[in-house]
Image (tube, rainbow, N blue to C red):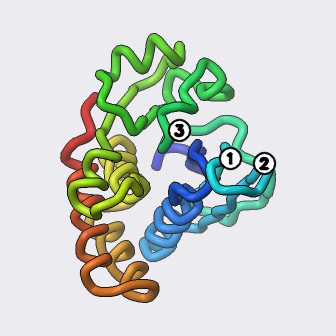
Amino acid sequence: MPKDIFEIRFHARAGQGAKSAAQLIAEAALEEGKYIQSFPEYGPERAGAAMRAYVRISKKPIKTYAAVENPDAIVVIDPSLLSKDISNGATKDSVLIVNTCECPGNVKKKTAFQGRTYAVDASGIAIEVLGNDYPNTATVGALIKATGIVSLRTITDKVKRFFLEKQKHEAAQANTIAVKRGYLGARE
């Protein structure tokens, strides 16, 4: 982690798991001894409405509580949200991870994003592995590959425990597989 604070901004629709994805990343970083912050930002609170979730990870205490304005990583869980506005505040050193079957070059053209761009078919992975279109854990895997912000082992252990607390063993196992498949399937 080269900067004092590494900032991540998720773009999704309510109900797609961006809030949970942000929480998983933050809690995995906490387990690695880092300081964290994670919170969602909703517009009209209804399923399907566009929303954002934010994560900050640091080796030092975090003293800001504002929304992430200059993200080091942007994760787009719902590709229908892709536009030039997605890259607001990003720099050429930022990384963009998008749930799409398109090649990263096409994503760059649509968004005018200047940094490294990764594409992952997170929806396809989710449908195959989970049996439904909840692409959040697969996009988490792609984020880990693109940034290395936490280790793959830490995030898969966290995902497994998270889903064991809330659901059955099968869901924990399937979501762990989705993270690994997202990691392996992310292409730059």
Residue at numbered disc 2: 43
Disc 2 residue type?
Gly
Q: Position of residue 54 (x, y in %)?
A: 64, 52
Q: Which mark is residue 49?
A: 1
Discs 2/3, front: 2
Disc 3 residue type?
Ile
Which quadrant is the C terminus positioned in? top left
CA gap, disc 3 and disc 1:
18 Å
Local SS, label 3:
strand
Image vertical order of residue 122 relative to residue 178, above or below = above
Q: Position of residue 158 (x, y in %)?
A: 38, 75
In contact (CB < 8 Å): disc 1 and disc 2: yes
Image position of 161 (left or right of 39): left
Discs 3/1, front: 1
Residue 137's quadrant in the figure?
Answer: bottom left
Local SS, label 1:
loop
Residue at numbered disc 3: 74
Q: Earlier in the sequence, mark 3 or mark 1?
A: 1
